Image: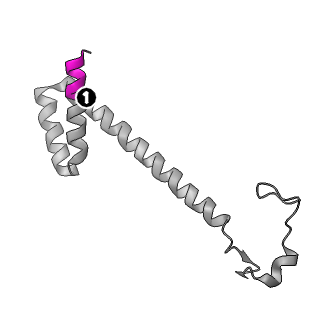
Amino acid sequence: MNAQRWEEIQVGFDQLVELDAPHRTARLAMLASSDPELHRALESMLEADAAASARSRSYTRGMSRSRALSSPALHCRNRPVTSDDAGAIPTSGVRNGASP
């Protein structure tokens, strides 16, 4: 692949990701008949981008859950932790969420 072709692919990808789904589909359909090689390259890049976005969203949701689990607003015995519980909560010997 030469530099000019790679530039066409990059520009095409940048344009396509900005379009809404119906317009992107129409543009890809036009490319499928006029430039099948470009169409395949762009479709492959769009699929990879969508997969990466899905993994990123999944990771972000996981991080949000783990932050919630380590939040000081944890519940103890189905109620919020209060200062009355301070003696009942082990603070030494606990590492990475493991019990002593």
17 up-or-down from 8: above or below: below
Q: Is residue 6 left or right of residue 78?
A: left
**Which segment did they paint magenta?**
2-9
Magenta span includes 94 = no
Kindly identify the residue that appears in the image at 21 percent across and 21 percent down.
Answer: 5
Kindly identify the residue that appears in the image at 20 percent across and 48 percent down.
Answer: 19
Residue 28 location, x and y as percent? Answer: 18, 37
Magenta span includes 5 = yes
Residue 53 location, x and y as percent? Answer: 41, 46
61 up-or-down from 23: above or below: below
Front residue (pair 42, 12)? 12
Residue 12 location, x and y as percent? Answer: 20, 34
Q: Looking at the image, what colour scheme do you see? A: one colour
Q: Quadrant of the N terminus?
A: top left
Q: Quadrant of residue 43?
A: top left
Q: Residues within 10 Å of mark 1 (few under 14, many from 20)?
A: some
Most common secondary structure along the magenta stretch: helix
Q: Quadrant of the C terminus?
A: bottom right
For label 1, the SS is helix
87 up-or-down from 92: above or below: below
Residue 98 location, x and y as percent? Answer: 81, 57
Residue type, label 1: Arg
Q: Is residue 5 left or right of residue 80?
A: left
Q: Which residue is mark 1?
A: 40
Q: Is residue 99 left or right of residue 63?
A: right
Kindly identify the residue that appears in the image at 84 percent across and 72 percent down.
Answer: 89
Q: Quadrant of residue 77?
A: bottom right
Kindly identify the residue that appears in the image at 81 percent across and 55 percent down.
Answer: 95
54 up-or-down from 80: above or below: above
